[in-house]
Amino acid sequence: MSKKEKENLTDVQKIVNHYFHTKGYSLEEIKKDAKKKKIVYSRHTKPAKQLLELASDVKKAKEALSTVAKWAKSRNLDYSIETVLKKWLELDQLEPKKKKKRPYYNNRPMVKSERDNKWYVIDKDGEWLEFAGKKEDIKWREED
């Protein structure tokens, strides 16, 4: 899309395009899928207009869309422009879900016993073996 075409977009179109961008679509994909009727672009214009009225400018509306998109994606939830409208009052509290870090030693999961304050490595049979290595040997991995 040329610079001139971008300037000719209405504010509502900018919001709808940003929504599809958060869903992973490029502008060319949006146009192609709209022609094939895979995307009903006009279905999103009314909520985009409502969001624009609520946000008072395009920048704030896009920021709200991005916030909800990050929050929903981190929880494997679907979202729409209507979701932003519903979550409007909670926007400042919506945080992406943090991934938990879990300890591993030689690619085996570990647990820490609260009772005796020791680390254990879980072997392939599910048995807990007392960890005798160094703390530097523990690898932390992010998991859902």
Image (cartoon, rainbow, N blue to C red):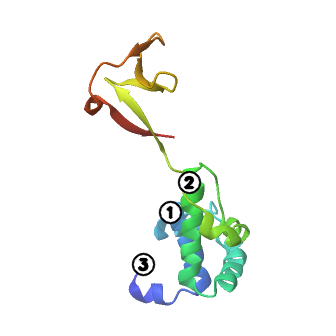
Residue 92 occupies quadrant: bottom right
State whether residue 33 appears in this view.
yes
**Which amino acid type is marked by label 3?**
Met
The residue positioned farthest toward the front in the image shown: 116
State the CA–CA distance, disc 2 to disc 1: 15 Å
SS for tag 2?
helix
**Which amino acid type is marked by label 2?**
Lys
If you read the primary sequence from the N terminus, does the residue marked by circle 1 or circle 3 appear first? Answer: 3
Q: Mark 1 points at which residue?
A: 25
Left or right, residue 138 beside residue 27: left
The 10 Å Cα crowd at callout 3, few under 14, some 14 to 19, many 20 or more, is few
Residue 90 occupies quadrant: bottom right
State whether residue 17 appears in this view.
no
Disc ID at residue 1: 3
Q: What's the residue at 35%, 19% (across, down)?
A: 131
Disc ID at residue 73: 2
If you read the primary sequence from the N terminus, does the residue marked by circle 2 or circle 1 appear first? Answer: 1
Pair 3/2: label in front: 2
Disc ID at residue 123: none
Residue 136 occupies quadrant: top left
Residue 15 x, y percent position in the rendering: 58, 77
Depth order, front residue of 46/141: 141
Residue 139 x, y percent position in the rendering: 32, 33
Q: What's the residue at 69%, 85% (across, down)?
A: 53
If you read the primary sequence from the N terminus, does the residue marked by circle 3 or circle 2 appear first? Answer: 3
